[in-house]
Amino acid sequence: MVVGKEKPKLIVNGKRVDGRAPEELRPVRMEVGVLKNADGSALVEYGNTKVLAAVYGPREVMPKHVALPDRAVIRCRYRMLSFSAEERKSPAPSRREIELSKVIREALEPAIMSELFPRTAIDIFIEVLNADGGTRTAGVTAASLALADAGIPLRDLVAGVAVGKVDGVLVLDINQIEDMYGEADMPVAAMPSLGRITLLQLNGVLTPDEFRQALALALYGIRKLYDLQKEALRRKYISTAEE
Amino acid sequence: MSVTPEQPVIPKIRLNAILNVMSKGVHTDKRPLHSYRQIEIKTGVVPNAEGSALVKLGNTQVIAGVKLEVGQPYPDTPNEGVLIVNTEFVPAASPTFEPGPPDENAIELARVIDRSLREPRVIDLSKLVIIPGKKVWLVWLDIYVLDHDGNLLDASMLAAMAALATTKIPKYEVNPGTGEVVIDRTTRTTPLPISKFVATVTVNKIGNYLVIDPNQEEESIATARLAISVSEDGTIVGMQKMGMGYFTEDEIVKAIELALQKGPELINTIKASIGMG
């Protein structure tokens, strides 16, 4: 973080610091099957936020005592690469990363049909390559693509996006500056076809009315990301089928 | 790595019995689904701490303490004091808690409380500056769970709020030559500047019911939980979905309504316990 920097104006003439309208996503890129060894993988970019997800499994659980008799254990690690942010991040796991690994696992658990694979493990690794706000939600979006790519049965894809409140305006898909200087940051993830919200956090202050609007805005963004997810999967598997 | 936890073994017949009781609109201890167990808040329980509170929520017990130390401000907020929140689930509190560094549940609980205090500026950190840019008060808020019978987050927030609201800053002198701060902990006079009160209401999804303040057994069959922190000015100051299940949009709207209704009750309970009621 830059010392003594003044809070910039986050909304000018109705536009945001990067020129977007309040309800506009950043340019999104999704690519499925980017790693050779992993059973499933995906790279997701929301603007300058770049996140890689890899899935291994269902596979044998090591150590064995972690295994569950009636379902697969889901193991999830969210991590930021040391050079992914403005300041170098120590490679040791931070409290934030420990919390986010849990929150992301719990965002994916409702989607994975883990009861089909008792006594196995499904491992999800999320590596943040470049952080510019919204890394956990991009991580969820990427992880659910990687799970689909690994052929793991899902109830639905999970997509995530963060809504923020900056200079009093609710905005979709906040970036780092908006997160740092804004009044609220609300990451949301959902299974759109089933209408199930699987991740919801609020870091900041909202009135109940603002919250309802923010949730609606997040779900609108999630729908768009969901369509892009399906497109990314089709791109990979339809071209593979034609070969 | 965050790993799917082992699910507690609850016989199906017991699970059905609990859901059956809840279908009648009450908890297994017969109180309404949207009510809290008896709340007892005792402040000043640890004389050596600058502020402390012991909270009993039914059989759940949580102790929170505040220690103040002189330290350096963060470089990006040179004119503000520093708040640090830690939580520990001590092994005495439950057969399932193990000694060792805080696990993901303890870390999550501490971070949810930290955010719910920080974002609405519950403590006016700008009033905790000793020498601008150089020396400020560090507010160490440490929460220990002593006995686990469910709803640790709501109990912890009650304890945190009561401890902070009764914290007194020790007398100190700054040596004008060296800039050294000498603290006299025997004389504590100035209260910690508290701008507003907040409370956390965790709404549990058990079967198809939205339930408040479950005991440990009821909580163990909740598929998802939504912690909602509310301020006395009627705003939402923090939220966290927990657990392996999901919420529908409709359920979330109902949960918020519940929190906005129950939060002020909790805040009044804290205020009454410290003589502000």
Image (cartoon, rainbow, N blue to C red):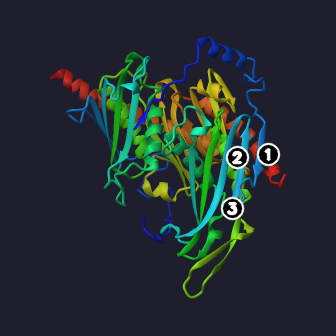
Residue corresponding to mark 3: B50
Residue that extends furthest to the bottom in the rendered view of this protein: B177
Q: Residue at x 78, y 26 (%)?
A: B31
Q: Residue at x 43, y 17 (%)?
A: A69
Disc 2, disc 3: CB below 8 Å? no
- Specify whether residue A87 is in view: yes
Mark 2 or mark 3, whichever is nearer to me: 3
Q: Residue at x 84, y 51 (%)?
A: B277
Mark 3 or mark 1, whichever is nearer to me: 3
Disc 2, disc 1: CB below 8 Å? yes
Residue that extends furthest to the left in the rendered view of this protein: A243
Label 2 to label 1: alpha-carbon separation = 9 Å
Residue corresponding to mark 2: B158
Q: Nearer the viewer, residue B272 or A207?
A: B272
* A237 to A53, vertically: above or below: above
Say which chain tag 3 marks: B
Question: Which quarter of the rendered picture does the N terminus of chain A lie within?
Answer: bottom left
* B100 to B208, vertically: above or below: below
Say which chain tag 1 marks: B
| Amino acid at the residue labelled 3 | Glu
Say which chain tag 2 marks: B
Q: Position of residue B184 (x, y in %)?
A: 68, 73
Question: Which quarter of the rendered picture does the C terminus of chain A lie within?
Answer: top left
Q: Position of residue B75 (x, y in %)?
A: 48, 69
Query: Left or right: where does residue B6 sit relative to residue B202?
Result: left
Helix, strand or loop under label 3: loop
| Amino acid at the residue labelled 2 | Leu
Residue corresponding to mark 1: B269
- Kindly indicate the quadrant of the structure image that contains residue A17: bottom left
Helix, strand or loop under label 1: helix
* A216 to B158, vertically: above or below: above
Q: Position of residue B82 (x, y in %)?
A: 57, 63
